[in-house]
Amino acid sequence: MKEQRQFDAFNATSLYCPKCKAAMPVIERLLLILPDGELYEYKCRRCGTSLGERKVTKKPEPLLVR
Ligand SMILES: [Zn+2]
């Protein structure tokens, strides 16, 4: 699960905003629902600049054998 660790930074409530030139609190917005997960967008709470995206991959469900 090394890939998931890279996204830990995006879990923080503040991200650096180039427009505000400071770490700003962000709004997490559900952007897209994908077949295998969900895509979230992070926007600066002050100026609304998009600061990043994060894809949350669903854990594969165990196959049910009937
Ligand atoms: Zn900003």
Image (spheres, helix red, strand yellow):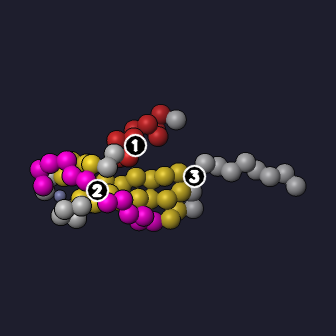
Residue 54 as seen in the image, left or right of residue 19: right
Taking the view exactly as shown, the residue that stands out farthest to the right is: 66
Q: Is residue 10 above or below residue 50?
A: above
Q: CA distance from mark 1 to mark 2?
A: 15 Å
Q: Is residue 8 above or below residue 30?
A: above
Location of the C terminus (image quadrant): bottom right
Q: x, y percentage for residue 25?
A: 25, 53
Q: Which residues are magenta?
A: 20-32
Q: Residue at x 45, y 65 (%)?
A: 32
Asked if the residue under mark 2 is in contact with the one under mark 1, i.e. CB atoms within 8 Å, the reply is no
The amino acid at mark 3 is Lys
Q: x, y percentage for residue 11?
A: 38, 46
Q: Would you name the residue on which mark 3 appears?
A: 58
Q: Which mark is residue 7?
A: 1
Residue 2 as seen in the image, left or right of residue 27: right
The amino acid at mark 2 is Val
The rendered magenta stretch, by its main secondary structure, is classed as strand
